[in-house]
Image: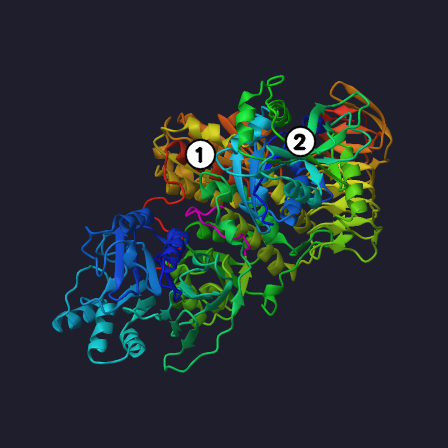
Amino acid sequence: MSLPSAVVLAAGEGTRLRPLTRNRPKPMLPAGTRPILEHVFDQLIEAGIDSITVVVGYRGDRIRSYFGSSYREADLTYVRQDRQLGTGHALRAASSIIDGTTIVVNGDQLVDSRLIDDVATAHDVDAAATIGLVRRQEIGEYGGAILDDDGTVAELVERPQDKRAYKLNAGVYAVEPSIFDAIRRTEPTDGESSLIDAVTTLIEDGETVRGTVSDSYWLDATYPWDLLDLSDALFDTGVIGDEVASSATVHDSATIRSPVVIDRDCEVGPGAVVGPHTCLGENATVGSNAVVERSVIDADSRLGANATVVDCVTGIGVDVGHASVVPGGPGDVRVGDRFFEDEPIGALLADRVTDRGGVTYAPGTIVGATATIAAGTTVRGRIDDETEVRS
Amino acid sequence: MCGIIGYAGGESDDTVLERLLHGLSNLEYRGYDSAGIAVANAPLAVEKRQGELSELERALTDGGTDSDDWIGSDAVDGFDGPTGIGHTRWSTHGPPSDVNAHPHTSPNGSVAVVHNGIIENYCELREELSAAGYEFRSDTDTEVVPHLIDQERSAGVDRFAAFRAAIDRLEGSYAIAAVFPGCETIYVARHESPLVLGLGEDGNFLASDVPAFIEYTNQVVYLDDGEFAAVSPSSVTVSDESGAVVEKSIETIDWDPEDAGKSGYDHYMRKEITEQPRAIRDCLRGRIEELGGTVSLPELEGLESPSSVQFVACGTSYHAGLFGERLLQRRGIPAQTFVASEYDADELPVDEETLVVGVTQSGETADTMRALRGANRAGATTLALTNVVASSAARECDHVLYIRAGPEISVAATKSFASQQVTLSLLATALADTADPSSSASREHLRELRRLPDHIQSVLDDSNARSVAEAFLESDAYFFIGRGYNAPVALEGALKLKEITYRHAEGFPAGELKHGPLALVTEATPVFAIVSGREKTSATIGNVTEVQARGAPVVAVTDSPETVGSHADYVLEVPETHPAVMPIVANVQLQLVAYWLADALDRPIDKPRNLAKSVTVL
């Protein structure tokens, strides 16, 4: 069947992933070596969609300049949501473009094309909306749905804390233009107009809202260290596999331990060891005898000679100096007011962090964007954006 | 400067008209003071209008009954012939007007012609044809062509032979296409003006440039000088001057047609500014090995290391040439840069050890092509540094180095300038490599080139250029100064600003200010100073204090705000980097200043008045 067009919601920052979102929104953070959003586009295209409207907001220029006006065979149209007032509000930004059935997906979560396909197939126009669901044990952090026996959705609950049999709302919807009226009629919660609340309005109106349960994968990164799990899961599901780009240069004496992705224009120096479970983004450099293991090293970053980097997530343009050490997790991490113990993270280095060499990172260290760290220091805890750490 | 398109589709519906108009809109960057089309109905259906393409479209939908140039039936209904041609014009002979717009027709409507280029002997042909009773309606050189063809046709010659006989009479440069009433073949000739054929599934195209039809086909054939083609819905036949059929190779263009969209930006210029990190990644791909300290440019295989280098270029590309010149001089290779229209190989010392580098985004710039041809004749080795694969420069030079910037639509060059600078940096390193394979200076330079996409990204992320531009909306003039590697960027910053804002702007090497231009400096003339923290900062700061003493506001573009900032009213910061990489980053700030100033002044940023993207006349 020919699928309807799709709207991708990609306007939100993803504040829990700070400081990685200093310069780009969550959909542009790396899943493996490519932005999360690129995987979302891939799955939409895989499902047969060739016209995609992208709602951009926070740092939307990064999305537009990266993808331009088309991706693979799909046309991309951009609309702007100037203030981020919820997913319902975001969808309204695209209302002038939508007529007829539309697939709506989140631009910051990875979904399988089969799920998109299932939602499109299960939806017919007598239903006001159809929601894609997956089976999960842990739903508490996400959205849950209670299904009736006939496959209609009885109830949608955000962050459900009770023990009922919830399915996880995967954030894939087929909607009709009637959704816009429902969004308008729905009271904002905490100033945000939510798409889920609008669907609840449809259910309360007595409209049919279907749910379709799929066994396909659904992946989300809530906190910075989840980017490591995300790349692991992509390796496991085979979405990404061992790959060294043809424009990358790997010295003959370097060792590559799979699974590893080495993207375009990377350089790996003599004696270096890359992997396992490591992703090197475009134009990254691994110096002589450096070791990098279970890490996501984003584009333009460089690991100096003799650096050791384990369980590490970097932003773009990070400079880990010669002989610096990220010994790996687990570590205790503070995000906002919350404190997480024993998370599997060695260090998180945001965009353009520069260390001058011989720096040791205590497990769980988070360094803000454009911070500089003097040679020979040991850092721990949380360092703010643009801080200069002296020895 | 002008653009032509033709499509032979065979169907009697709107397809031909649709594809012609679409092609013209994709060619608008080549010129846009008038546009027209002719469709091979019987009689011919012709419509043409002064102004942007929208004027032509309006004339077509309104029926165009008020036009004198109207031949044949009325309204769009009349434009359903099997084949058609179109033209977008940038005036060279005669002012822009409906009458001077192409296509031009013979008085009895026996043929319609579109032409790009200049017919040098048109005066004598015009006299001859007038004497034979032909009446001229336009001021153009082109109008002699339909009359010449008609003269042959009246003598009973068949269409293609008449076309050939007419072309045979022409001197100068031309890409010409002609259609005849009710005939589904378009006849085409090329001499020193760009022309490319596109082989589609249900019809065939011809155009000045690939973007005109890339959405329909990526299979192309480039015509060479002196060749003719007969383009029909089902076939394309290329022949030489004697009429013998020529086997041409079919090339595949790997451009993405959607690259030409605006991605939701208001202007192509803004989109192209934001694309610079991506463009530079593409430019560098596979060309640098940082850890080994080497540059690899397989395209230059067989190039002997030259005793001296001469750059020939125009406009923004000239500024890139000046930058290349400095890079080579500092590597001990004598280099000079010439404005292409001022270059005369006969009067310059040129021998086979001289490398003449033509820097031209389009590869079709007429002044640069003429300089390169002169250099070729004088026995120099020639190298084209261009963005367009298989362009005239690429095909006629001994070597070609592509800058890989992707299609650039905005008339004001932005990303192509950045990619030219990067390519010149690689070229300079490659040419110097034989002398000094991996000096530490060049290794640092290469590392910073690899970091350049991220450096530019950080400027794009955090630039305050918009508020700086808006602080100087009503200034009398804008001056730009820089020293050494930053001097060419001072010139480019001024050129960009004047092109798109229509405000007076000048760039100078910083030290030159006190030798004259300082007389123009007042409180109402902001001075943009590009100052690298690592190169003769104190000298440039001296120049800055000179202008400050005259009350001029100073905007410093610098990688060391702490030392330079105290001398400036505004700072446009760039990341700290190698002195030879800094101007590439600094220029992005200046592009943004020009863009936001033009935007605040509500200028037609992508199509500044009187300018065309690719200047293919001398």
Q: Can you give x and y, in whole percent of width and height, for residue A191 in the image?
A: 59, 18
| Colouring of the image | rainbow
Asked whether, in this view, residue B4 is left or right of residue B359, the answer is: left
Which callout, 2 or 1, points to the residue nearer the camera? 2
Depth check: give the residue in front, B174 or A154: A154
Whether B404 is among the magenta residues is: yes
Q: Nearer the viewer, residue A7 or B396?
A: A7
> Residue B549, how many percent across, how many down?
42, 26
Seen in the picture, residue A186 relative to B282 is either above or below; the reply is: above
Quadrant of the snapshot with the N terminus of chain B: bottom left
Q: Which residues are magenta?
A: B403-414
Image position, residue B22 (x, y; %):
40, 53
Crowding at mark 2 (Cα within 10 Å: few <14, some 14-19, many 20+): many
Circle 2: residue type: Thr
Q: Nearer the viewer, residue A146 or B81?
A: A146
Residue at label 1? B596
Mark 2 to mark 1: distance in Å? 26 Å
- Give the letter of the chain under mark 2: A
At which x and y percent is residue A144? 73, 27
Kindly state the secondary structure of the residue where label 2 is placed: loop
Query: Of helix, strand and loop, which one carries label 1?
Result: helix
Position of residue B412 relative to residue B147, above or below, is above
Q: Quadrant of residue A369?
A: top right
Please state which amino acid type lies under the numbered disc 1.
Answer: Trp
Above or below residue B202? Residue B516 is above
Residue A368 in view in this figure: no
Q: How many numbered callouts? A: 2
In front: B422, or B264?
A: B264
Q: Is residue B90 magenta?
A: no
Magenta: main secondary structure equals loop
